[in-house]
Amino acid sequence: MKKSIISVFLAVVVVSLCIFSISNPSYAKETFKFRLATHYNTQHPGYKALQNIVKEVDEKTKGAIKIKIYPSSQLGDYTVTYEDLMRGAVDMALIPIPSEYNPKLEMNFIPYLASSYAEMGKAFGPQSYFYKNYGAVHDKLGVKLMGIYVEGLIGIVFTKLPDKYNVASASKASRVRAPAIEVYNLVVQDMGFSATTIPYADLYSSLQTGVCDGAIGLTPQLAYSDFRDIISHYVTYNIFVENIGFFMSKKVFEKLPTDYKKIVEDAFMKEAMNSYKVAGELDGKALKDLEKYGVKIVNLSDKEMKAYVEQVKEKTWPKLSKNIGEETLKALIDAMK
């Protein structure tokens, strides 16, 4: 009799659990299909990072989250993709960061926020002041920042090495091309060069014909792939960290169960942090390749680099407050001390 009662009780429990799981979706296996957009082609290291994310999320959710990558801007350029993230029309992305929606989005262009690969974790990691505040700016736009992907450090290429290139306080008789981004022009001038804005498509011919003597905005990788036969020197000023963002639509992210949210966040952040190491390796290889090709690699001494860093922070950083905000800029400065 006792065994019969226990058997009936267990049967009731099993049936109840089945009914409960059916009526409560959180206990049933939910499945999701996401589209992930990027401007990278399938040969770029960034695409490999996305493949790693797709694999890890698939494995850890036991197939519940399927992500399809759309490379080479198949879903639109980065400005269109960011807008689609805001609307929830695109689920995930690895793209450059458009600043037209909020001037504070230019925070990732702060010169000398990090000047070495070792400093990148402190500057861009998940616990950094930058990351938390930058994430808050995106959050207000309906986009969740999932990590900062680093491509490399930016120096200056020259067709002829200028005199006093290593003296921060000196005026140099060289005209350096800068992208059409205000901070690039400011920092070039504050380093003692003349700045000129030239479209990237015209840069090669401008260097070739002497319209400009050098250019900022190139990682060693880009300098090697596109300009190795026209430049004579690459100076590792390491002024900017070339970076873009891993993103997810906030609307889409908030629909995920809590455990899935963590799996997705961890997968993206893992690749973001790994990109610092990969960037160092790729930059190092590109510098060696440039040298083999005949381009002279010029490194500053610690003292010379420190002088440039201090000068840019003293002269250029205050000029950025109108876009970033004085309070935010001051906190960033304090956080990086």
Image (cartoon, helix red, strand yellow):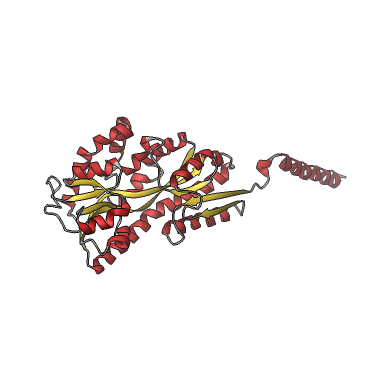
Regarding residue 117, the answer to whether it shows in the image is no
* Residue 334 visible within the image: yes
Name the residue: 77% across, 45% down: 14
Report the front residue among 257 and 328.
Answer: 328
Q: Residue at x 32, y 31 (%)?
A: 325
Quadrant location of the C terminus in the rendered image: top left
Looking at this rendering, what residue extends furthest in the bottom direction? Answer: 292
Nearer to me, 284 or 230:
230
Percent from the top left, x then y, of residue 295? Answer: 22, 64
* Residue lying at 47% horizontally and 50% vertically, measured from the top left: 268
Quarter of the figure with the N terminus? top right
Q: Is residue 323 above or below residue 266?
A: above
Please name whichever residue, 335 or 237, is drawn nearer the observer in this view of the structure.
237
Residue 5 is situated, as x and y percent measured from the top left of the image, at 84, 43
Q: Is residue 24 left or right of residue 58?
A: right
Determine whether, in the image, residue 128 is placed left or right of residue 139. left
Does residue 15 appear to the left or right of 120 in the view shown?
A: right
Furthest-right residue in this view: 1
Q: How many labels were placed on the picture? A: 0
